[in-house]
Image (spheres, rainbow, N blue to C red):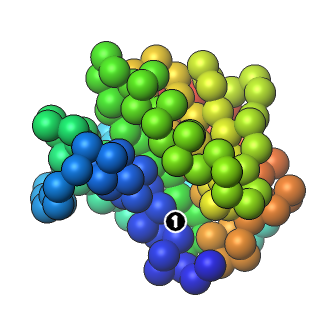
Amino acid sequence: MNVHSRLLGPAAFVLSLAGMAGGAHRVNTMSAAPLGACGLITQQEAAKALGAAVPAGTEKAMTLPLQGRSVKAEMCFYGSEVSVTRYALGSTAEAYFTQYRQSLAGKSGYQDVKGLGDEAFAAKGQLTVRKGETQLIVDVGQARGGGAKELDAEKALAVLALGRL
């Protein structure tokens, strides 16, 4: 999988759920909050997880349409190799998470992950975690395609991020 399609992974979560509800939706970009996703993982933590230097995090925030309402997504990219995305899913977070999990469960490389947040799974070379009304997608080694080493690094970053929610 190429880097460009992997970078769309976090937004694909919301867009896949929006597609389940039917209809085409427009994505609106807005300015980033000062303590957004880059406050969940430091540059040093991202570099340690990757095993190589990474640039300072670049924050992006978007409001995405989801089944008749909007969901705030905050993303932090440490270059093209490490990212963390936080979704504020609200009171229906468990249902949205379940839908997203089911959309990926039959795909190659899917696996449930125990011991993180309320529930977690790995798919498409990314770790997805739900804690309460928040969902995180953590990705390490985006250009490398994901594997056991990358999943272990994603788990370590997820533990840090969950502690900062």
Locate residue 80 relative to residue 32 in the image: left or right. Answer: right
> Can you say whether 58 is above or below 103 in the image?
below
Q: Nearer the viewer, residue 2 or 139?
A: 2
Q: Which residue occupies the foreground of this view, 55 or 36?
A: 36
Residue 95 in the image: x percent, y percent?
A: 42, 25
Who is closer to the viewer here, 116 or 17?
Answer: 17
Q: Residues within 10 Å of mark 1 (few under 14, many from 20)?
A: many
* Res 82 quadrant in image: bottom right
Say which element carries label 1: strand
**Residue 10: quadrant of the picture:** bottom left
Residue under the point 47% across and 80% down: 4
Going by the picture, which residue comes out furthest to the right?
Answer: 148
Going 77% across and 52% down the picture, which residue do you hit?
A: 151
The one nearer the camera, 24 or 79, is: 24
Q: Taking the image as drawn, is residue 148 in sight?
A: yes
Q: Residue at x 55, y 79 (%)?
A: 3
Q: Residue at x 85, y 58 (%)?
A: 149
**Which residue carries the number 1 mark?**
78
In this orientation, does residue 157 appear? Answer: no
Question: Amino acid type of disc 1?
Answer: Tyr
Provide residue 1's location: percent of width, then percent of height: 62, 79
Eyeballing the image, is 77 above or below 103? below
Left or right relative to 126: residue 35? left
